[in-house]
Each structure stands twice: as structure tokens, then as C-alpha cells.
Amino acid sequence: RNLFQSLLSATSVVQRLRLTDNFQRWKYMQNLLDEELPAEDVNEVVFLLLDNYLKEEDDEDLNAPERSDELLAVLNKVLDYEEEIEGKRIIPVVKNPGCLPGDGALLDKIKELLPDPVENEDAHNSGWDTVREIHGEAAVRYSNIEGRAEWNVVCLVARLITYFNFLTGDGLVSKKDSC
């Protein structure tokens, strides 16, 4: 392993991909939906968003899903899947090559974190609207019909990170860690 690879693995995905920049977050989302991101980057972003959501429990400025005992219980079950790889904390939602789905039980828990299509229709539709805006209406329709496992999992991740404020950047960096 060369020095560049060592330095790259020591840098968080937020720094390496400049995800504090609004444009770079949208670009990340496009690359995610195009299945062009390494699993490590996807899994690290999922961990950061969910872990920071848990840490920011008293922050009223965080524009995130409404806290409930049920949501927090599911979130803690998802975080039980946390792994550390090369010094980075991740939730193994996808695996290489090609963004293959991770553990089915984990993916089922991730689905429980998303807004219910009946009880919270606006939030549910908002996630799909974002996916369609970024990936294209026809491409999303075709991909949903095709139903490939890789598409299903990256779409799930895209809707999850949208719901937990990835695109605004609010959920990426914990205010408690940055103070």
C-alpha cells in the first residue's frame, strides 16, 4: 500500500470529497444514483448522517426528521451494525463491487427509518422527487421497472440521506464535534 492510499484512507469522506460544499453534495448524490461510488464512501456517509442525528438531539436548528421513541429505537438498531474499517466508522449498507446490497436485515431497518408513504406522504414523496430530479424521470422509471438489486439499494440510500439532510449539509458534521 502506497503513501497516497494511506493518506486517502485516513481522510474522512467529507474532507476528501469536499462534501461541505453544496455542489459537491449534489454531485455525490448523482454519482450515488449512477452507482459510481465506492461502497466505503457510501457507507461512511450513512454512518455520519445517522450518528450525527443521534448526537444533535437537542439542536432545534437541525432540519431533520421529527424525533420519536420509535425512530430512535430503529436508528439505534441500525447503528448496531456499525463497523470500523481502516479507522473509519461505517454502516455497511452496500458492498463492492458495484454497490451491491449489504445485509438484508440491515436494509429492512434502514427502510423503517424512511417516512411512511401513508402517514407522512409529503416526506415520502419528497425523497422520490429528489431522486427523480437528480437521476431523471425516465431513468428512474426504467430503473424501478428493471428492479436491479444495485439500483434498489442506491435508491434506498439516496432517499435515506435526503431525509436526514445530506443535501443541506446539516447532518454531515456534528456541531458538538466542531465546537
Image (cartoon, rainbow, N blue to C red):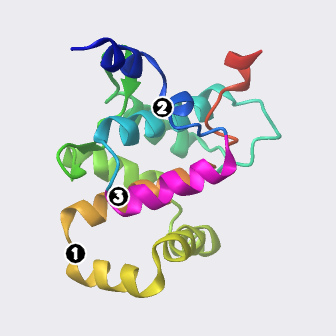
Q: Is any atom of residue 75 visible in this view?
A: yes
The quadrant in which residue 145 appears is bottom left
Q: Which mark is residue 13?
A: 2
Residue 167 visible, this orientation: no
In terms of secondary structure, where does tag 2 sit?
A: helix
Front one among 177 and 79: 177
Work out whether mark 2 precedes mark 1 in sequence or the reverse, and give the earlier one.
2
Q: Are marks 3 and 2 in contact (CB under 8 Å)?
A: no
Q: Quadrant of residue 62?
A: top right
Q: CA distance from mark 1 to mark 3?
A: 12 Å
Q: Position of residue 114 (x, y in %)?
A: 49, 57
Q: Which residue is mark 1?
A: 147
Numbered range of the magenta stretch: 21-35
User: How far from the left and from the top, in percent, is residue 84?
Assistant: 32, 18
Q: Which residue type does callout 2 highlight?
A: Val
Q: Nearer the viewer, residue 94 or 69?
A: 94
Amino acid beneath label 1: Gly
Q: Main secondary structure of the magenta part?
A: helix
- Give the position of the N terminus as an image quadrant: top left
